[in-house]
Image (cartoon, rainbow, N blue to C red):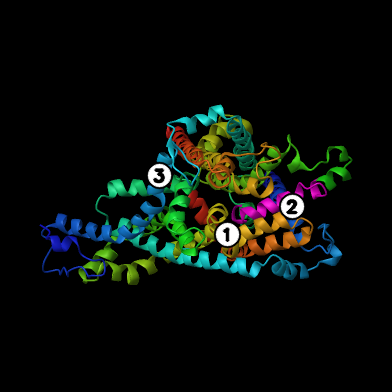
């Protein structure tokens, strides 16, 4: 039995001495005691996490049912904020933009990554450490700086147009990020650039874990490189592909820094993403309830994507 | 014969990919070194003075100081919280962990967007918006799930007998953590420190919302500098590279830890 005094053991108080002569008569009691100490230690990080993440999360849900300008009184509007995704054409357009971004942030990098993993012979390549460093570079580069780099590249007098002019395609040159048609794909390609190296490293490290006998067997059965890829490599990389899909789709859904620094959602609303719409609604023309609804929807989608993808990958 | 063919294919694939990644960065670097305000690359006239000028024009000394303060405090606090939580969940066990740990893991999947709106208005009401303690609290709270998850895994990889022996010797949990546990998971601590520094330094969204004026960290200052300063492209690029430099420097020094940490961190579920 534990006394109440033991339950409130302060973390700094040393645990009572347990000598060899007093074997734990009640191992359950000892473990329970240890777990209470554990709770006391974990209480600080847990409390902070609860205050900064869990409580605001619950409040987000509550906010999302109200119409509030951030100052005056809030009025209950039920699900109207969520309905805006269907009724408000600008907000609705962000969904389409995300789908375009998914192609560039997710589909292209994963296909490129798989392609290079398939082309590379298994085992170590010369200089792999250096290549890995290069491929991971976009992951550590400050997002604002990435945005600046590509703002420069896409500028009217920037390197991309210079190259186009040099190869005689000068008629295609334009201010890419100010173009209603091209701004979104141009930003998408930034995502492709930032992600494909990560996917590649992930997949290459995955192929080294595939049992070489499977390749032997495939060759014995007369499988060519293409069938070998679909029958051995791709199934072997299922876990890694699931991770890449989850991370990249979530990233395209959450795109903010890149758009905010380069186009602010423009020209017009042609590059508006849900996160930018949230920022505008929360902090520029306060429709706080709507902003909360966007945030909650994004969080639910991220969670759903993670669960569905992981489930699908685990199913055999 | 076939082997050397494979080697050639490998090097070509890797080389092409590497050039694709590096080209934009190299162009940007040349822009930063250009003597011309339009940023036209000039290999014969590398103007290193651009960095000095950008530092002054963009007021980077102040902004980098703010970033450094936030990042160092966030890393220190995060390590402390992660050690406490990781040791509790990984070694001692925690009452109610069957519920608490999944709830904690959930935090790794909750995006900033889901909490930022109430967080802003609550913090505004208690006067924490636009203050360093305010943003630090948020960084710390949001960093708890990954930090605890990361060090819990490190602690669980250690042999249990070590801690049982310490307990038999009468060492209290905090003493055990400080003298025995923490030194044994030192590699995991270093990796966590690097990742957490990078995430805090590179943060833009939170800082944009919560910090204004003189408290703008480097990323936000750079963002507003580029809005005001559209005529001197070379200085803008130089300022960008200065802001990226601290994390890049750490990445050069500790690439293995960075890459291993990010790969392992992405496979967290």
How far is disc 1 from disc 2 in space, using C-alphas? 34 Å
Residue B56: image location, x then y, percent = 71, 70
Range drawn in magenta: A139-160
The N terminus of chain A appears in which quarter of the rendering?
Answer: bottom left
**Above or below: residue A187 compared with residue A43:** above
Characterize the local packing of mark 3: few (<14), some (14-19) or many (20 or more) Cα atoms within 10 angstroms.
some
Say which mark, if any, is on residue B45: none
Chain letter of mark 1 equals B
Circles 3 and 2 in contact, beta carbons < 8 Å: no
How far is disc 3 from disc 2 in space, using C-alphas? 45 Å
Characterize the local packing of mark 1: few (<14), some (14-19) or many (20 or more) Cα atoms within 10 angstroms.
some
Chain letter of mark 3 equals A
Tell whether A55 sits left or right of B32.
Answer: left
Q: Nearer the viewer, residue A129 or A69?
A: A69
The C terminus of chain A appears in which quarter of the rendering?
Answer: top left
Chain letter of mark 2 equals B
Q: Earlier in the sequence, mark 1 or mark 2?
A: 2
Per the image, label 3 sits on a secondary structure element best described as helix
Say which mark, if any, is on residue B23: 2
Say which mark, if any, is on residue B212: 1
Say which mark, if any, is on residue A59: 3
Q: Magenta includes A171?
A: no
Per the image, label 1 sits on a secondary structure element best described as loop
Per the image, label 2 sits on a secondary structure element best described as helix
The outermost residue toward the top is: A87
Q: Is residue A316 visible?
A: no
Label the magenta part by its dominant secondary structure: helix
- Say which quarter of the image contains residue A48: bottom left
Residue A303: image location, x then y, percent = 45, 39
Residue B96: image location, x then y, percent = 25, 49
């Amino acid at each position: 039995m534990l006394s109440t005094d033991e339950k409130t053991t302060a973390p700094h108080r040393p645990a009572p001495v347990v000598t060899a002569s007093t074997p734990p008569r009640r191992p359950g009691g000892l473990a329970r005691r240890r777990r209470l100490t554990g709770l006391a230690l974990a209480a600080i990080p847990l409390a902070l996490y609860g205050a900064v993440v869990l409580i605001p999360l619950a409040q987000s849900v509550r906010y999302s049912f109200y119409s509030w300008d951030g100052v005056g009184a809030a009025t209950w509007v039920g699900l109207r904020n969520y309905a805006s995704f269907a009724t408000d054409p600008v907000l609705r357009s962000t969904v389409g933009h995300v789908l375009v971004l998914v192609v560039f942030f997710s589909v292209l990098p994963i296909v490129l990554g798989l392609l290079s993993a398939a082309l590379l012979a298994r085992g170590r390549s010369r200089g792999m450490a250096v290549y890995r460093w290069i491929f991971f570079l976009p992951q550590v580069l400050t997002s604002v700086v990435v945005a600046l780099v590509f703002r420069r590249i896409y500028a009217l007098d920037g390197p991309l147009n210079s190259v186009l002019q040099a190869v005689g395609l000068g008629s295609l040159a334009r201010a890419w990020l100010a173009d209603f048609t091209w701004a979104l794909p141009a930003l998408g390609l930034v995502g492709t650039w930032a992600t494909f190296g990560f996917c590649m490293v992930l997949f290459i490290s995955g192929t080294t874990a595939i049992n070489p006998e499977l390749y032997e067997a495939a060759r014995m059965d007369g499988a060519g490189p293409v069938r070998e890829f679909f029958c051995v490599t791709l199934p072997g990389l299922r876990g890694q592909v699931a991770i890449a899909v989850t991370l990249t789709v979530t990233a395209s859904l959450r795109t903010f820094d890149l758009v905010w620094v380069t186009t602010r959602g423009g020209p017009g609303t042609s590059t508006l993403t849900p996160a930018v719409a949230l920022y505008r609604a929360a902090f520029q023309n306060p429709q706080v309830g709507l902003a909360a609804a966007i945030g909650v929807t994004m969080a639910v989608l991220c969670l759903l994507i993670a669960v569905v993808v992981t489930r699908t990958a685990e199913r055999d | 014969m076939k082997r050397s063919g494979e080697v050639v294919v490998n090097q070509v694939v890797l080389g092409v990919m590497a050039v694709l990644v590096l080209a934009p960065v190299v162009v940007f670097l040349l822009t930063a070194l250009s003597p011309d305000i339009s940023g036209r690359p000039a290999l014969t006239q590398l103007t290193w003075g651009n960095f000095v000028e950008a530092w002054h024009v963009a007021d980077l000394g102040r902004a980098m100081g703010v970033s450094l303060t936030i990042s160092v405090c966030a890393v220190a606090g995060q390590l402390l919280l992660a050690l406490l939580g990781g040791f509790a969940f990984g070694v001692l066990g925690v009452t109610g962990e069957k519920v608490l740990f999944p709830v904690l893991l959930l935090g790794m999947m909750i995006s900033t967007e889901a909490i930022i709106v109430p967080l802003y208005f609550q913090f505004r009401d208690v006067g924490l918006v636009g203050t360093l303690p305010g943003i630090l609290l948020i960084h710390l709270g949001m960093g708890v799930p990954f930090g605890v998850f990361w060090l819990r895994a490190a602690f669980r990889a250690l042999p249990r007998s070590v801690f049982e022996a310490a307990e038999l010797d009468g060492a209290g949990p905090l003493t055990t953590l400080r003298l025995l546990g923490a030194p044994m998971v030192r590699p995991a601590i270093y990796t966590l420190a690097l990742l957490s520094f990078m995430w805090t330094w590179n943060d833009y969204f939170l800082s944009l919302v919560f910090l204004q004026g003189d408290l703008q960290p480097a990323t936000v200052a750079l963002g507003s500098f580029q809005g005001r300063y559209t005529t001197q492209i070379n200085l803008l690029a130089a300022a960008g590279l200065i802001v990226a430099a601290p994390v890049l420097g750490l990445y050069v020094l500790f690439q293995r830890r960075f890459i291993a940490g990010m790969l392992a961190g992405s496979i967290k579920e």
